Image: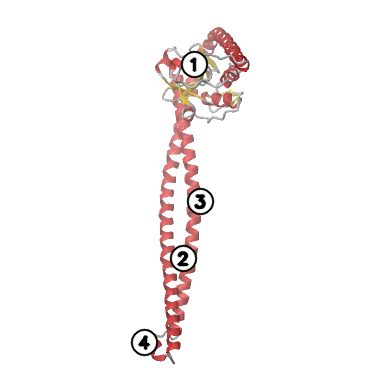
Amino acid sequence: MVRLQQLSDSLERARSQYDASTAQLGRIERDLRENKRELRVAKHNLKVSQRTIAQRLVALYTTDQESTLEVILGARNLDDMITRLDNAKSVTSADSQVLSEVKHFRAVAKHSREVLSHARTMQARVVAQRAAAKHELETKIAEQQGLYSSLKGEIQRLVAAQAARQLQMAQQAQNRLRALRATQQQEQQQTVVGVSVVTPQSDTIAPPSTHSNVVGVAMSMLGTPYVWGGSAPGGFDCSGLVMWAYAQVGVSLPHSSYAQFTYGVPVSRDQLQPGDLVFFDGLGHVGIYIGGDQFIHAPHTGDVVKISSLGEDWYAANYVGARRIL
């Protein structure tokens, strides 16, 4: 059973890494499309500028381009000389501008090619990483399924043995939940009639009243099978259960225990309140605290959404921290 849980935790980490590389690959592919577009524009502009230069060279070759001396000597009078000099300067300025554009667009095209080459290298690297992560996932899934098959009978016996204990813990949790809601209602009523409610001083931000609803929603899923990648009542993984439960009270969370740890504010273990998120195994696992040193979670393949204690050996040894979603 310990080996199966370790495999499940490893699988969850591999899945999060695969999702992260998939997201990175998407960003790179968007950059590639943009760089390709910029390169096409730069090439087009470069061709236009080069064509203008070519036409100008032909014009210079086929027409008499007077030198400054020829302009002065060929002028009929002073006004004519000034006019001819101005025209010559204008031509020279236009040629310089076109040459400058050619240099600019050539530099832009070169830069775009370099960026495109780098993006393609990054794309190849991420694709390779993604393929490796996928292979690791497939290997772990196969290993997990093989181990599960060999332990299926034992798991079924354990599930049956735990049913009574789960029922008892669920009843205790429901009683705590009713008491919490009654306390919240009493405080709201006292606030309405102008009675001050004295609460213990603490540096920790109090949880929203919706937290008790999150616990109730999650409790309604007790016994739902664990499904890797699941995030709906038909089956959940650990972060999928948390995401779904909070979505029912209007709070959007990502489908990743690693990403969920970046939401809300940290809360110490002695300040935990129902609805807080508790994390384990290097953020590879997450559950929802329900009070009484217990939490609800979707543990691993072959198990169901259930209640566990923070004091149990594995969870106590692998506890990372908690977050309060505000």
Mark 1 to mark 3 CA distance (whole Å): 49 Å
Q: Which mark is residue 164?
A: none
Q: Is residue 66 visible?
A: yes
Classed neighbour count for the residue bearing mark 2: other residues with Cα under 10 Å, few (<14), some (14–19), many (≥20): many
Q: Which mark is residue 69?
A: 4
Label located before the other in sequence (3 or 2): 3
Q: Is residue 137 visible?
A: no
Q: Is residue 173 above or below residue 247?
A: above
Estimate the x, y position of residue 18 in percent, counting from the top left.
Answer: 47, 34
User: Residue type at mark 4?
Assistant: Leu
Front of the two marks 2 and 1: 2
The answer to the question of whether label 2 and label 1 lie on touching residues, with beta carbons closer than 8 A, is no
The answer to the question of whether label 3 and label 2 lie on touching residues, with beta carbons closer than 8 A, is no
Between 229 and 272, the residue placed more toward the observer is 272
Circle 2 — which element?
Answer: helix
Between 13 and 111, the residue placed more toward the observer is 111
Front of the two marks 4 and 2: 4
Tag 1 residue: 151
User: Residue type at mark 2?
Assistant: Leu
User: Taking 67 as reference, is 34 left or right?
Assistant: right
Front of the two marks 1 and 4: 4
